[in-house]
Amino acid sequence: KMSVLVLFALTVTPLIFTPGPDMLFILSQVMGKDAKAGMMATVGVCCGYLVHSILVALGIAAIIVSFPVLFETIRWLGIAYLLYLAFGLLKSVFSKNALNIEKKTSSNPIQKGFFTALLNPKGMLIYFAILPQFIDKSANTVSQGLILSFIFISLIFVVYCGLSILFSKISQKTQIDE
């Protein structure tokens, strides 16, 4: 069973490193303030994925996937949120002729990180499509789902906190050089 857990970790790690709304939000917090703000945003992101974990453990994710209209509605809400974030980034690029990650910190990075993760289509894909592929239906599916979720959330926490520290150092170095 350990090989399944390792295979799952190897499967989701590249997805975690793929830039998306979670990472952009966390980086905006780091650049607007400091590594601690990025880590607070990471806590919110992890809490958002905790909701997905509970849905998987309770079998609600399977129900959502089995009702295409409900799944598509949730997916399109996530896509709409991504488009909203992308539009804001494009607006910034065209108004300043440069790519800028907004350096404005959220008044509540944990809450915003929570909703960013909760509505993230990539997160939904991992929880509703990828994670179930690693669950043995003949064993305790709840505990397996929770263990796999714990691995995913732990990897997110480590990667995003590490990126917060790294980008904080880069941001400080860039400000010193200017």
Image (cartoon, helix red, strand yellow):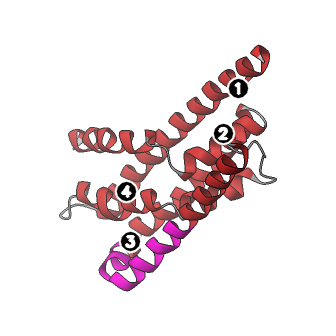
In the image, what residue occupies the spot 75% across and 33% down?
Answer: 34
Q: In the rendered structure, are the residues bearing label 2 and label 3 in contact, judged by CB atoms less than 8 Å apart?
A: no
Label ID, residue 171:
1
Q: Position of residue 46 (x, y in %)?
A: 56, 50
Label ID, residue 61:
3
Please, what is the three-letter code of the amino acid marked with disc 1? Answer: Ser
In the image, what residue occupies the spot 78% across and 16% down?
Answer: 176
Q: Quadrant of residue 64?
A: bottom left
- Compared to residue 178, the image places residue 149 above or below, namely below
Which segment is the magenta one?
Answer: 61-80
Precedes in sequence: disc 1 or disc 3: 3
- Compared to residue 132, the image places residue 65 above or below, namely below
Q: CA distance from mark 4 to mark 2?
A: 33 Å
Q: Secondary structure at mark 3?
A: helix
Q: Is residue 131 magenta?
A: no
Q: CA distance from mark 1 to mark 3?
A: 39 Å
Q: Nearer the viewer, residue 58 or 7?
A: 7
Q: Is residue 64 magenta?
A: yes
Q: CA distance from mark 1 to mark 2?
A: 17 Å
- Compared to residue 116, the image places residue 160 above or below, namely above
Q: Secondary structure at mark 2?
A: loop
Q: Residues within 10 Å of mark 2 (few under 14, many from 20)?
A: few
Precedes in sequence: disc 3 or disc 4: 3
Q: Which residue is mark 4?
A: 126
Q: In the rendered structure, are the residues bearing label 3 and label 4 in contact, judged by CB atoms less than 8 Å apart?
A: no
Q: Which residue is mark 2?
A: 98
Q: In the rendered structure, are the residues bearing label 1 and label 2 in contact, judged by CB atoms less than 8 Å apart?
A: no
